[in-house]
Image (cartoon, helix red, strand yellow):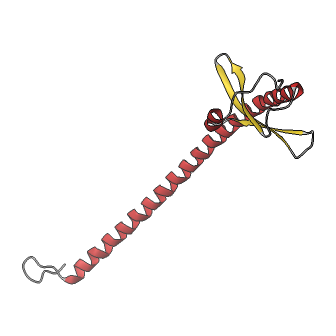
Amino acid sequence: MKTLKKGFRSTASCAQKQKQSGHALLLSAIVGVLAFALWLVAFRSTNDAQGFHLGAANRQTTMEVLPSAMAKAGRLLQSGEPPKVPFHCVYKHFVAPGEWTNIHLKFDRGGGSRKWSVEATLATATDIRRYPGAPDSFEG
């Protein structure tokens, strides 16, 4: 390294140092991007695994509860006809001591036919507020 005057360096040595520091910045940017990509892959796989387990639990609940709710709907239709068409109600299914699952039942009849269609879905908070509880029967 050549010194021109006291305390001054030649421009060639300054340019060489700037070139080296540019490589370090580029390398640190690449490492940062790769670290972020690794974090993103780990986050997505964890999130997908949790979603899979929640979906499996919901399917399990649905498969255990909805057949019982459809049986209740069938017993209601045997006792008479709903007071209005379509008729909505919320059926409380006993799961365990102190634990209930709310099911939204919708009774509908197309046109003038005597056939009824029944839909049973897990009730949302809105369904619980909006619709009455399932009656014991449709008589009188």
Residue 56 in the image: above or below residue 9: above
Q: Is residue 10 left or right of residue 44?
A: left
Residue at 70% x, 35% y is: 122
- Report which quarter residue 57 is drawn in: top right
Q: Is residue 98 left or right of residue 28?
A: right
Q: Is residue 20 left or right of residue 108?
A: left
Residue 104 placed where, x, y %? 72, 34
Residue 113 placed where, x, y %? 92, 43
Quadrant, the N terminus: bottom left
Residue at 11% x, 83% y is: 4
Residue 132 placed where, x, y %? 69, 30
User: Which residue, as the protein is rendered here, is positioned at the far left?
Assistant: 6
Residue 50 in the image: above or below residue 82: below
Residue 48 in the image: above or below residue 95: below
Residue at 6% x, 78% y is: 6
- Report which quarter residue 68 is drawn in: top right
Count of marks overlaid on the render: 0
68, 44: nearer the viewer:
68
Residue 89 in the image: above or below residue 25: above
User: Which residue, as the protein is rendered here, is positioned at the far front?
Assistant: 140
User: Which residue, as the protein is rendered here, is positioned at the far right?
Assistant: 114
Residue at 12% x, 79% y is: 8
Residue 101 placed where, x, y %? 68, 27
Quadrant, the C terminus: top right
45, 90: nearer the viewer:
90
